[in-house]
Amino acid sequence: MSLRIVLVRHGLSSFNVEHRIQGRDDLSALTDVGVAQARSTGAALADVGFDAVYSSPLQRASDTAAHLLEVHGRGLTPSFDEDLLEIDLGPWSGLQRRELRERFPAQEAVWRAAPHSLELERRDGSRYRPLPELMQQAARFCRRLLESHAAAVDGADSSVLLVGHNAILRCLVLTLLGLDAQGFRRLRVDNGSISVLNISGAAAGTQSVQVESLNGTAHLGAPLPPRGPGPRLLLVRHGETDWNRQGRFQGQIDIPLNANGLAQAEAAGSFLASASIHRAYTSSMARPRQTAEVILAAHPGVPLTATRGLVEIGHGLWEGRLEREIAESWPQLLADWKRAPHTVEMPEGETIHEVWSRSLNTWSTIAASLDDQETALVVAHDAVNKTILCDLLGLTPADIWTIKQGNGGVTVVDYPQGAGGIPVVAAMNLTSHLGGVLDRTAAGAL
């Protein structure tokens, strides 16, 4: 890790409560709940030393930054940046969502289904597309941010805090991941939420982005984001094994959880105890099955189904070996695995494409089997979870290192339009139940 970017959405505002379109109007203020959210977020980030803080100048964001930093307690002041302004929905600003549907039904339908193609008209009569404009704004901010913190990106650790709004924060994530505006609806950013991205490697011309977590809200009192219509899936990585701790490549060797892994499973179980879980699925291997069984102790009667489709990638001759041992016999193949995993076939093992195919087929089958009111628990492995999340976000097999999956981490995926609709990554790699907002679990070997 070099540059850590922590994204925080402003607290609940008066317009949020009234279900009004805010956009760039500055008529909305934090509610008492929003102030409490900002202060809780400051407490959750108290052990993170930020080198810089940037905030949207709009009142609801700037007040969030002020309350957050007061509790954070390190004397930081934000720099206000207009490239963190919210999306420009000028013709709609101030309208309640009900009024928007009544007055502009066709445009509102486009905004829900294909926001990147929405066109609006400014007061001077000119036409514009709000979301593509916001993506350009996000790209401009990211360029300036990385230039300002180039030393960190090139090697020296640093952390920055960005306080902004729903749409601009989603666009920043998409921009850093190299995705376009069509991925806008695949992400969720709640009031007061914390998301973390890590950036490294610019000096060598191989700058990489890792999504550590998205939309964490447990510090606000509820472990998971509220659910809406449609099925929900809870994706969990198994707890730690001795081989994770030692850095051995596990693959399909059936290593059980160690004591810390069982504790992580119990923590995940407590974290998910209040969730309504109707079905559960696990890889047929011991470490995810043990994790699932511990989680389900708080959900008696929920059936657990084991499937080969969710087993870890087969590392073949690498299994059981330390990285340094692999480097001695397969130096180029290991280098390729780190640089371009989609090009590698493990010696007597699998390719990431094969894992991608079977993991996604299994995931899609599970999602399609759920009724709109149902929630399913899915417990699997690092590479399996990464392929699923890459697909959900619109990434490719080449991008698996972009996704971090800590042992015992929890991801939430919603299908608000049913299993056949666009999936929403409502939260990703939540690890607060394991000891803090930041994912401190070792990456380990797959």
Image (spheres, rainbow, N blue to C red):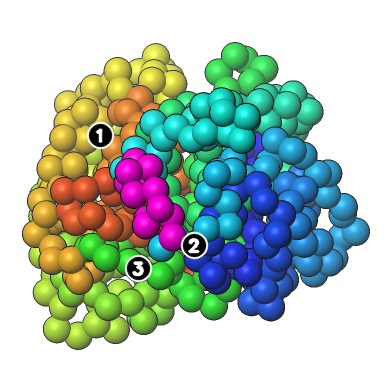
Which is nearer the N-term, disc 2 or disc 1? 2
Q: Residue at x 61, y 35 (%)?
A: 123
- Kindly indicate whether the residue at mark 3 contacts the one at mark 2 (C-beta within 8 angstroms): no
Amino acid type, callout 2:
Gln
189 up-or-down from 123: above or below:
below
**Badge 2 local density, few (<14 within 10 Å), some, or many (20+)?**
some
Residue 227, numbered circle:
3
Q: Which residues are magenta?
A: 99-110
156 up-or-down from 37: above or below:
above
Comparing 418 with 307, the one in front is: 418
Residue 307 visible (yes or no) = yes
Which is nearer the N-term, disc 3 or disc 1? 3
Horizontal and vertical percent position of residue 438: 59, 56
Q: Is residue 273 magenta?
A: no
Residue that badge 1 annotates:
315
Which of the image's four quarters has the C terminus?
A: top left
Amino acid type, callout 1:
His
For label 1, the SS is loop
Q: Residue at x 24, y 74 (%)?
A: 277
**Badge 3 local density, few (<14 within 10 Å), some, or many (20+)?**
some
The quadrant holding residue 124 is: top right
Main secondary-structure element of the magenta-colored stretch: helix
Horizontal and vertical percent position of residue 204: 62, 15
Amino acid type, callout 3:
Arg
Q: Residue at x 19, y 70 (%)?
A: 374
Nearer to us of marks 3 and 1 is 3
Residue 411 visible (yes or no) = no
